[in-house]
Image (cartoon, rainbow, N blue to C red):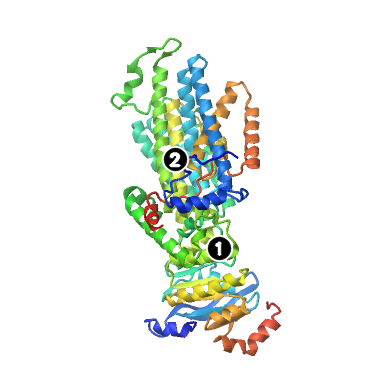
Amino acid sequence: MADDSHEPEDDIEPEGADDGSSAEAGGNGPGGSRSAFEGGVDTSQRRVERLTNYGIAAAAVALLAGVLVGLVSPTYLLFLVSLAGMYALLSLGLNVQWGYAGLINFSVAAFFGLGAYVPALLSASGSPLPWDVSPIAGLFVAVAATVVLALAIGIPTLSLREDYLAIASLGLAEVLRLVVRNQQSWTNGTNGIGGIPLFFEGVPVLGTFASDVGTVDLGIYTLGYQFWNGLLNFAIVAGFVVVSYVVLRRVHRSPWGRVLRTIRSDEDLAEALGKNTYAFRMQAFVLGSVVAMLAGVYYSYSNYFITPGIFDPIFTFYAWIAVILGGSGSNRGALFGGVVIVAIVEGSRGLGVGASWRLFAVGALIIAVMRFRPQGVLPPRKELIWPGAHRGGETDE
Amino acid sequence: MSEPAAARSEEPEEAGDAVLRTENLRKTFGGLTATDDVTMEVERGTITGMIGPNGAGKSTFFNLVSGFYEPDGGSVVVNGEETTGMDPHEVTEHGLVRTFQTPRKLEGMTVREAMLVGPQRQLGESVIPLFTQPDAVAAEERQNLQRAEELLERFEITHLADQPATDISGGQLKLVELARAMLAEPDLLLLDEPVAGVNPTLANKLKAIIRELHEDGITFLIIEHDMGFIMDLADPIVVLNQGAVLMEGSPDEVKNDDRVVEAYLGGGGGD
């Protein structure tokens, strides 16, 4: 295979430049059949990463070219990228639960829906509830509501064995969906909630940004209110994704993340080593739920109108597909998975492919991944140790 | 050096200090009584062996004292504090750490990383300090890493540090497990068949390491079927049979006891 001598070092480890590389050289040599993150397979991992990078770059170039020749409007491009961010939030959240801690959570859609409904109920003009809270305050209420719901689902289910958690979480998510559909007086039921304000409403400058800028004429396109508003929405979801990603990256490679990975691998062992696995699972469940909920907040403020369809289990399954495709336990894999989901959902729509074929394509993709690359496209890195901790070890060696 | 009694007398603790004490410990599974009235003590500073024919209740006993099973009756006292009915992690906090008969593998981790799960009460195991005191977390991690590397060196398995934890042999895994358990700084270490399926060279190495750790002040309770190994290493030895303590004594006493011979031959399960 290709010589990878100039490939950038896979991971943090500044540690033992000499010691580590000699061990790796051994693995990279003839014994290419060793498992997991042994050197030999590292090479193929790097190849996949390179291909993934090329693929993403090619897609980006194609989209930009589409914009330049007038096939894709900049407003639609912004919408697409924002949508990718939304799915990425769902998959990043689920990745904390399944990828880190091994929790089979089928209630992602419940938190997606909650993230959309709580701010809408609190701040929309079409809300049946009397309050009129500012949208940004609505976000914080949504976080609090998510913690409460996550605890309510987690307390009875997280002490169950994994397969029971799957069923129980799916059931509870369906219960929530049905309550929202049927509890007319609180939620407007299937009529949904309209008149959701913009996220930045009432905020100086940003609140009126989209209408203040006016129209900019670029020749093939005229960038008007829609575009500027799309830009704000993009900024919101990008902010959510960046903050979530930075937070998750840090917790993933911390001792906390290590305990979760131990639990995923062998819960008894974690207990025997003095880890309160119930508490750790609960923390992972709550944290992941908050991240997934943010996707709903974005959805709510960018759509102005929501219906109980947002609680549909399909969102749970999209998140699962994204995580499995990207590589369970890998944050960048979850990001990548989110992008692929949007490519499938919107791409098939753009090509005029029907919904049934779309689901077929998703199913075929999952089978192909499980068959040829069960660890996902971008599996987690081989060793996760708190950054900076290696410095001591280095001087040692 | 192999005299546990010598080490025991060096221990400054008061005489007869039990690091583990069980009274009338009982566990039934449906109609089957796995452990029936086990009353025993592990004296601080000893290497206590536990033998008995298959089905004698040894593993059940381990699961009971380490919190994996809830006893149907009786009590467990670790380091002078009652731990009956506690969760395994709480028992570990009281100073009792166990290993498993089948070594547990940690998927997706290197040996170095798997070792770092051992240390107790890590600051970085809480989410908030990761953001409020990252330097303290790094300092702690650095220290743990250093301890882990020291132990790997002591156990002569430094070369395994970069290996995936799923890729090493069963015997090596036993060494890693023991090393990791040491990072938890236990008072009492429960080893469930430490040399089962381990080659003789590695078994001797394990024996030497256990002795060394014992001299450092760790108390051991070891289940083992390999009679040569346990008779050489442990004193006293507790014999379980049919869920109860048959006898306790020095290796010589156990070897020459008719009831023990009877239990192994009559029980039909000896190996």
Q: Return the x and y of residue A116 as percentages of the image width and height.
A: 45, 33
Query: Which residue is found at the position 37% from the left and 59% from the top?
Result: B143
Q: Mark 2 points at which residue?
A: A291
In this rendering, the answer to whether B221 lies above or below A271 is below
For disc 1, the neighbor class at 10 Å (few under 14, some 14 to 19, many from 20) is many
**Which of A12/A354 is in front?**
A12
Q: Return the x and y of residue A157 as percentages of the image width and height.
A: 52, 52
In this rendering, the answer to whether B235 lies above or below A395 is below
**Which of A117/A363 is in front?**
A363
Tell me which corner region of the image, top left, top right, bottom left or bottom right, holds residue A354. top right
In this rendering, the answer to whether B56 lies above or below B135 is below
Q: In this view, does B263 lie to the left or right of A393?
A: right
Q: Return the x and y of residue A268 as percentages of the image width and height.
A: 53, 61
The amino acid beneath tag 1 is Leu
The amino acid beneath tag 2 is Val
Residue placed farthest to the left in the image? A204
Tell me which corner region of the image, top left, top right, bottom left or bottom right, holds residue A349. top right
In this rendering, the answer to whether B93 lies above or below B253 is above
Tell me which corner region of the image, top left, top right, bottom left or bottom right, holds residue B37. bottom right
Q: In this view, does B127 lie to the left or right of A106?
A: left
Q: Which chain carries label 1?
A: B
Query: Which residue is found at the position 58% from the left and 67% from the top?
Result: B101
Q: Marks 1 and 2, how far apart in space? A: 37 Å
Q: Mark 2 lies on which chain?
A: A
Q: Return the x and y of residue A124 as percentages of the image width and height.
A: 40, 28
Q: Name the residue under label 1.
A: B173
Please state, as top left, top right, bottom left or bottom right, where the N terminus of chain A lies in the image: top right
Helix, strand or loop at mark 2? helix
